Image (spheres, rainbow, N blue to C red):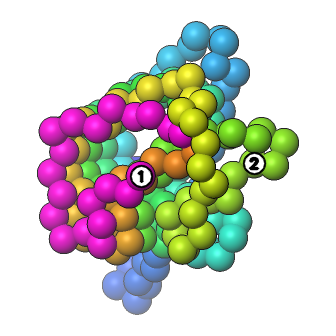
Amino acid sequence: IFTSVSDADGLASTTPQKGDWLNIVFSANPQDNSQSNLDYVEFRYGGQGLERPVKEMVKIIGATININHSKFENSQSIALRLVDSNGTIENSIFSDNACGISVDSLVLPSSGTDGGCASNVYSFYSNAMATTTPQIKTNQFIRNRLIAIETRNGSTPVIDGNIFTDNGYPIRI
């Protein structure tokens, strides 16, 4: 479990808040062909910041990470951001975040990306330039304030069999 110290201390006098901690980043060179698995992991009360640059609770850059039976809850911004990443996200729950998942591609690696769905600034149009195809399947997206799943900058995820309940938008492309 990755959570706020206020959530983990067991004291009734402390109340965890969205954005209590910044983020966790996983990165790799995509040519490494390495793979990691995160099973039954919980991420809560992270993702500090709604202003640019947005800080997502969990960010995966160029790494292949499979996430299964995990929970992403109460992120102040994006719960999970995939940037040029393969892997499968399945059987997991994304609830009470500003945004559930943002799938992105570094179209211009020198300039980075602007952070995704936490504002009304949209990415610029590009052809599908991503060479990765993450799979987002059989997850539940519940009460994500802005967007449950967002794709940006030519990213091409496979989105299948997910359940969307009371989100701002289920999917934005």
Tag 1: amino acid: Ile
47 above or below 129? below
**Pick the front one: 48 or 87:** 87
Give the distance between the C-alpha atoms of the residues marked 1 and 2, in whole angstroms.
19 Å
**Pick the front one: 23 or 144:** 144
* Residue 61, quarter of picture: top right
Residue 74 placement (x, y as % from top left): 38, 69
Residue 89 placement (x, y as % from top left): 34, 35
What's the magenta region?
154-173
Q: Residue at x 40, y 34 (%)?
A: 157
Residue found farthest to the right: 110
In the shown orientation, is residue 133 left or right of residue 164? right
Disc 1 secondary structure class:
loop
In the shown orientation, is residue 17 left or right of residue 94? right
Callout 1 crowding tier (Cα within 10 Å): few <14, some 14–19, many ≥20: few
The residue that mark 2 highlights is 112
Tag 2: amino acid: Gly
Residue 9 seen in the figure: no
The residue that mark 1 highlights is 173
